[in-house]
Image (cartoon, rainbow, N blue to C red):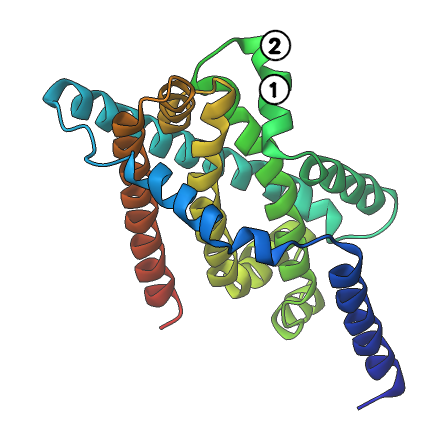
Amino acid sequence: MRISTVAVLLGLLALVIASFVSLDLQWAAFLGPEALASMGRFAAGFFPPETAPAFLAKTGWALLETLAMSAVGTALAVVGGLLLALPAAGSGAARAASRLMLNALRSVPELVWAVLLLIMAGLGPLPGTLALALHTSGVLGRLFAESFENAPPAAALALRQRGVGPGRVWLFATLPQTLPQLASYTLYRWENNIRAASVLGVVGAGGLGQMLAYHLGLFQMHETCTVLIAMMLLVALVDALSWSLRRNLTR
């Protein structure tokens, strides 16, 4: 192991130790009998979940809205990420400008994007969808660019030696080699966007998150429990679907 690697690992270890020392983590109070009893009483208030047909129908529609927000937001992010990843994997001023744009997009959390877009578009799923698209474009663009840069160069070099242009080299050499990796990144970000879409509803961006904020704010715990169960089912469904697709892609 090189000295630089050892130095980095020791630095990370020192940072972790310093983090534990500097934080006032009151584990005794957190795990004390009173705290556990209070949490138990609070958790018991959620049950039984609300099962009225009208409320279940409303929750089901919000679930579909959350799923649609995440899917459309991720699809838009794939397009935006690819458009920024191509110059970001190149050289010169275009590389620097696109890298700066990618950093800016992913540095702003989805929740902040949603608040800014709510001012422009009002309440509803549109600002939440666009917030997911903007933030995820920055994340996917960076991952896509690194995939293009790390692609095996032999096929692209062979096409360039035959006089093939850069666009066709990317289309017929780089893209086929990196497509499984790009699809895996996209599916993983879709999983994350399901969770993010649920959180964005808290600021009025539609879906299950908006229902959660409303009923929890009114201390309607049975309704809140139903919404939480719907969130967990949606995340589990998308996780299973994404795992199955990634497994098929890597075969």
Quick one: 11 or 148, which is closer to the camera?
Answer: 11
Instruction: Give left or right: position of 26 versus 101.
Output: left
Q: Name the image quarter holding residue 66.
A: top left
Total residue callouts? 2
Q: Position of residue 129 (x, y in %)?
A: 48, 26
Taking the image as shown, residue 133 lies to the left or right of residue 43, namely right
- Label 2: which secondary element: helix
> Residue 81 vs residue 2: left or right?
left
Inspect the image, locate mark 2, and give the three-letter code of the amino acid beneath it.
Ile
Res. 193 mark: none
Badge number at residue 119: 2
**Spot occupied by residue 204 in the image (x, y as percentages of width and height):** 48, 17
Which quadrant of the view contains residue 79? top right
Which mark is drawn over residue 115? 1
Q: Is 30 on the left-hand or right-hand side of 26?
A: left
Q: Residue at x 53, y 41 (%)?
A: 78
Residue at 62% in and 61% down: 147
Check contact, mark 2 vs mark 1: CB within 8 A.
Answer: yes
Q: Residues within 10 Å of mark 1 (few under 14, many from 20)?
A: some
The quarter of the picture where the C terminus appears is: bottom left
Q: Is residue 111 above or below residue 117?
A: below
The one nearer the camera, 141 or 118, is 118
Q: What residue type is disc 1 on?
A: Val
Q: Residues within 10 Å of mark 2 (few under 14, many from 20)?
A: few
Structural distance between the alpha carbons of marks 2 and 1: 7 Å
Q: Secondary structure at mark 1?
A: helix
- Residue 49 at x, y percent in the picture: 21, 33
